[in-house]
Image (spheres, rainbow, N blue to C red):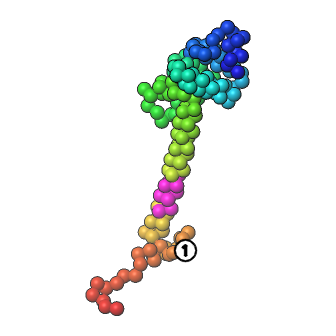
């Protein structure tokens, strides 16, 4: 795809200039990042296999890829690191974003479970202090939670 674009636009496909890769990405934005990213990876592989500098890393090419992908840095990242996010390769941005999303969901789930556990504990403590001895969700009377009292010198 990039070779044909270069022929049509009078650019050299190898070695490619980062500015040409950026123009290619911006021109192909309508295709979406899902179709453009494999083409960008092919440009990268072609240059790396020939021992040439990778024109897809950093600079204007990375900025164009980031613009088309529309990925934002994770909210949990410090502000001084968010700018660095845009210079990462797209596949690392996708991985980092997905990882942070999974982490945030797990954290929220754990916080919700902890809140429910605190509510249940408060309810059980309230019942115990009221001395009602009612059956709890676990099926144990609040008064029975202490267990049997044993005299310290009793021999069984």
Horizontal relation, residue 88 to residue 22: left or right: left
* Vertical placement of residue 144 versus 15, above or below: below
Q: Quadrant of the C terminus?
A: bottom left
Horizontal relation, residue 133 to residue 90: left or right: left
In this orientation, which residue lies closer to the viewer: 156 or 71? 71
Please, what secondary structure does the residue beneath circle 1 have? loop
The residue sitting at 60% across, 23% down in the picture is: 46
In this orientation, which residue lies closer to the viewer: 140 or 51? 51
In this orientation, which residue lies closer to the viewer: 39 or 36? 39
Q: Which residues, given as a range, are shown in magenta?
A: 112-121
* Vertical placement of residue 20 versus 43, above or below: above
Q: Which residue is mark 1?
A: 139
Quarter of the figure with residue 143:
bottom left
Q: Is residue 116 magenta?
A: yes
The residue sitting at 55% across, 44% down in the picture is: 102
Horizontal relation, residue 120 to residue 7: left or right: left
Residue 104: x %, y % from top left: 52, 43
Quarter of the figure with residue 16:
top right
In this orientation, which residue lies closer to the viewer: 67 or 10? 10
Q: Main secondary structure of the magenta part?
A: helix
The residue sitting at 57% across, 39% down in the picture is: 98
Residue 10: x %, y % from top left: 67, 8
Q: Quadrant of the N terminus?
A: top right
Residue 24: x %, y % from top left: 65, 16
Q: Is residue 75 magenta?
A: no
How many tags in the picture? 1
Residue 83: x %, y % from top left: 48, 24
Outermost residue toward the top in this view: 10
* Vertical placement of residue 52 versus 92, above or below: above
Outermost residue toward the bottom in this view: 156
The residue sitting at 51% across, 24% down in the picture is: 87
């Amino acid at each position: 795809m990039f070779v044909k674009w270069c022929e049509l636009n009078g650019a050299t496909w190898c070695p490619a200039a980062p500015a040409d890769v950026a123009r290619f990405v911006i021109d192909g934005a309508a295709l979406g990042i899902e179709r453009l990213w494999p083409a960008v990876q092919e440009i990268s592989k072609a240059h790396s296999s020939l021992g040439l500098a990778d024109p897809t890393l950093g600079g204007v090419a990375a900025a164009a890829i980031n613009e088309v992908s529309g990925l934002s840095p994770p909210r949990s990242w410090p502000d001084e690191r968010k700018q660095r996010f845009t210079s990462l390769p797209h596949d690392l941005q996708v991985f980092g974003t997905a990882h942070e999303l999974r982490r945030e969901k797990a954290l929220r789930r754990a916080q919700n479970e902890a809140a429910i556990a605190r509510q249940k504990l408060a309810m059980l403590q309230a019942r115990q202090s009221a001395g009602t001895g009612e059956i709890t969700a676990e099926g144990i009377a609040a008064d029975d939670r202490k267990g049997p009292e044993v005299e310290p010198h009793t021999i069984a």
